Image (cartoon, rainbow, N blue to C red):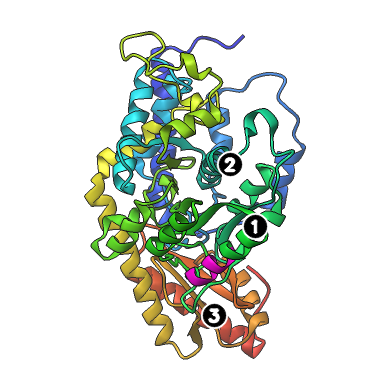
Amino acid sequence: MASEWTDAEIRRVGYLVVDLIAKHLTDIRDQPVFSPVPREVAERFLSTPAPRTGESADEILSEFGAAIEPYPFGNGHPRFWGWVNSPPSVMGIFADALAAAMNPSCAGGNHAAIYVERQVIAWFRELLGFPTTAMGLLTSGGSMATLTALAVARHTKTGLDVRADGLRGAPNRFAFYASSQGHSCIRKAVELLGFGSGSMRTIGVDATYRMDVAALERALEDDRAAGVRPIAVSASMGTTNTGAIDDLDAVADVCSRHGVWFHVDAAYGGPAVLLPEYAAAARGLARADSAALDPHKWMFVPVEAGFVAVRDAEAMRSTFSLVPPYIRSAGSATGVYGLPWFSEYGFQQTRGFRALKVWMTMKHAGLDGIRDRVAENIALARYLAERVRATPQLELVAPPGLSVVCFCHRGGADLNRGLLERLQLSGDAFLTSTELDGRFVLRACIVNDRSTRNDVDRMIETVVRIGAELTSGTAGAFP
């Protein structure tokens, strides 16, 4: 039996933890962006059995400092621009610790965590332009937000009692629509909801990688004529590949004409609505039936923190609630059970106190602070695009969208593959790749409030140097 933690011991170990956090956050700029876990360390993790007896807190923290902290994912570093991964806010880190100390179950009830989440939901409704009658829910991320939203679309648009009978006996086939640049979570959700990937319709894009709205309309008309029932269209406010924003107003018009569900994937680009230059996208987003937003992306909240908004709150509740409609209530702020439970609006019954890190991050930064960081990231991405255009060895492959820049070395696909791996393993900067029109390209996504122009300059210099080494055949072994 472990000994009771005293006030003094909690404080002693807590200070050790804070020292580790402070060191990690303040020393990270001087460390490699990415360092693979050494083979012997990885093998030790994979082969060591569960401990039979306990260890002291000091021993555990010592192992953390030696074998875990030196090999992070990398997204806290100012030259990490891979995928869509931001560094965590310090207030969010503290909030995670406080939430763990309280350790509430946030399915529902009358306790403070529930009201914190309801306040965050209200803040996000306003940010997305949704009415006060809409409902939302914090989720693990954009994938679960999308699954939740499309589950409501299934409940309302198939014409079936899906909860009782599933999809068997449907008189027709169903279809979902997303552009070729849409996130893979859309297809995953469609498959998990029982429609199968064969119900997905991939809509082409224009030269700026935005959904071809005319092609979407034709696809809907063709499916209707063939006896297929359209269910939902998913548009993007900031695609993962290029940061492109679909013409959300035009897509909303098409969805309205055809009576289909309009979902917007704003997991990455949603916070851009804070900037005046994205007012048109904000207007289109506000017309959606549902939207996904990831505070753990461009709002710098520690992972996991996603959000789904659904315009029709009652449809959302009817999709998931196991409380019969005739005894559902509006709840009471004074009773033990409180307001209607979040578990009636989504799949999870056991839910952590995610809201605290969102709440504390937003309280500390303010919407103006988040807006300024988003604006700085977009400006830095445009600076990167300018540097690429001005560098003879490099080519800008797509117009920069939001804070994504896709480019390549002019040496060809094989050289770019080798260049990317060497860049990542060098620890000097971290980019990822994507494929555009069949071309392998380098991709930088700047959602990092610690990045500067000097960091961009250093990355460009490293890319050019590695490209020259690979071109001349003088590149040595990987570091």
Residue 317 in picture, x, y percent from top left: 48, 29
Residue situated in front as seen by the camera: 354 or 194: 194
| Res. 200 mark | 1
Q: Is there a contact, CB below 8 Å, between mark 1 and mark 3?
A: no
The amino acid on which the numbered mark 1 sits, given as a three-letter code, is Met
Which type of secondary structure does the marked residue at label 3 adopt?
strand
Q: Is there a contact, CB below 8 Å, between mark 3 and mark 2?
A: no
- Does 308 appear above or below 268? above
| Residue 431 in view, yes or no | no
- Does 322 appear above or below 195? above
Distance between mark 1 and mark 3 Cα atoms? 31 Å
The residue where tag 2 is placed is: 154
**Quarter location, residue 374:** bottom left
- Is 218 part of what is drawn in magenta? yes
Q: Residues within 10 Å of mark 1 (few under 14, many from 20)?
A: some
The N terminus appears in which quarter of the rendering?
Answer: top right
* Nearer mark to the viewer, of 1 and 3: 1
- Is 114 part of what is drawn in magenta? no
**In the rendered structure, which disc, 1 or 2, sits on the residue that comes first in sequence?**
2
Residue 21 in picture, x, y percent from top left: 42, 40
The amino acid on which the numbered mark 2 sits, given as a three-letter code, is Arg
Distance between mark 3 and mark 2 Cα atoms? 41 Å
| Res. 408 mark | 3
**In the rendered structure, which disc, 1 or 3, sits on the residue that comes first in sequence?**
1
- Please name the residue shown 63% across and 62% down the image: 225
**In the rendered structure, which disc, 3 or 2, sits on the residue that comes first in sequence?**
2
Which type of secondary structure does the marked residue at label 1 adopt?
strand
The amino acid on which the numbered mark 3 sits, given as a three-letter code, is Cys
Q: Which residues are magenta?
A: 213-219
